[in-house]
Image (cartoon, rainbow, N blue to C red):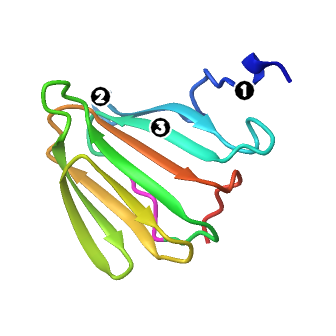
């Protein structure tokens, strides 16, 4: 494969979600996984402009995962400009600052809920397993 074959430009499927009023709630930006490039790990990047219409349900993975929520204000990148509540192994975590969460294999996690979004939130999810299977 040529070097350019390892670059992913296209947004992931189902890349745009709008609410009943036509406002964009989320826009998926890019997806990399084994089905996009054979042997690649899972990486997904999404912009949230409004709370999503639904959340991922509680699940586990056979491999480690890390997820992040990052604020988009260049003057204050640590400020999430939102409140996110995430279920993590029997507890609820409340985020108001940009953060990365490490999720060891077998750890129950999600759903997460977003509130008070005043500026877009960048969300990413990564695993070394390119198939990204929820169980």
94 relative to 12, above or below: below
36 relative to 4, above or below: below
Residue mark closest to the camera, 1 vs 3: 1
Q: Give the range drawn in magenta.
A: 53-58
Which element is circle 3 on? strand
Which residue appears at 40% of the width and 56% of the height? 55
Q: Name the residue under label 2.
A: 23
Locate residue 37, reporting x and y percent: 76, 36
Disc tally is 3
The residue lying toward the viewer, choosing from 116 and 39, is 39
Q: Are marks 1 and 3 in contact (CB under 8 Å)?
A: no
Q: How far apart are marks 1 and 3 (CA)?
A: 17 Å
**Disc on the earlier residue, 1 or 2:** 1
Quadrant including the C terminus: bottom right
Q: Name the residue under label 3.
A: 45
Q: Of all residues shown, which one is farthest toward the right?
A: 1
Which element is circle 1 on? helix
The residue lying toward the viewer, choosing from 74 and 44, is 74
Residue mark closest to the camera, 2 vs 3: 3
Which residue appears at 68% of the width and 43% of the height? 33
**Disc on the earlier residue, 1 or 3:** 1
Which residue appears at 18% of the width and 28% of the height? 73
Circle 1 Cα neighbour tier, 10 Å, few/some/many (<14 / 14–19 / ≥20): few
107 relative to 72, above or below: below
Q: Mark 1 points at which residue?
A: 6
Q: Of all residues shown, which one is farthest toward the front?
A: 3
Residue mark closest to the camera, 1 vs 2: 1
**Disc on the earlier residue, 2 or 3:** 2
Judged by its main secondary structure, the magenta piece is: loop
The picture quadrant where one finds residue 119 is top left
Locate residue 123, reporting x and y percent: 38, 43
């Amino acid at each position: 494969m040529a070097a350019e074959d390892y670059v992913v430009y296209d947004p992931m499927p189902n890349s745009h979600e709008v609410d009943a009023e036509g406002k964009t709630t989320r826009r998926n930006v890019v997806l990399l996984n084994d089905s996009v490039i054979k042997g690649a790990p899972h990486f997904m990047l999404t912009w949230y402009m409004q709370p999503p219409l639904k959340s991922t349900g509680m699940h586990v993975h056979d491999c480690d995962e890390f997820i992040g929520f990052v604020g988009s204000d260049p003057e204050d990148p640590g400020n999430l400009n939102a409140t996110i509540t995430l279920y993590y192994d029997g507890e609820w975590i409340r985020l108001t600052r940009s953060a990365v969460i490490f999720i060891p294999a077998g750890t129950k996690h999600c759903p997460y809920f977003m509130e008070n979004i005043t500026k877009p939130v960048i969300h990413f999810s990564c695993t070394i397993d390119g198939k990204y299977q929820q169980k």
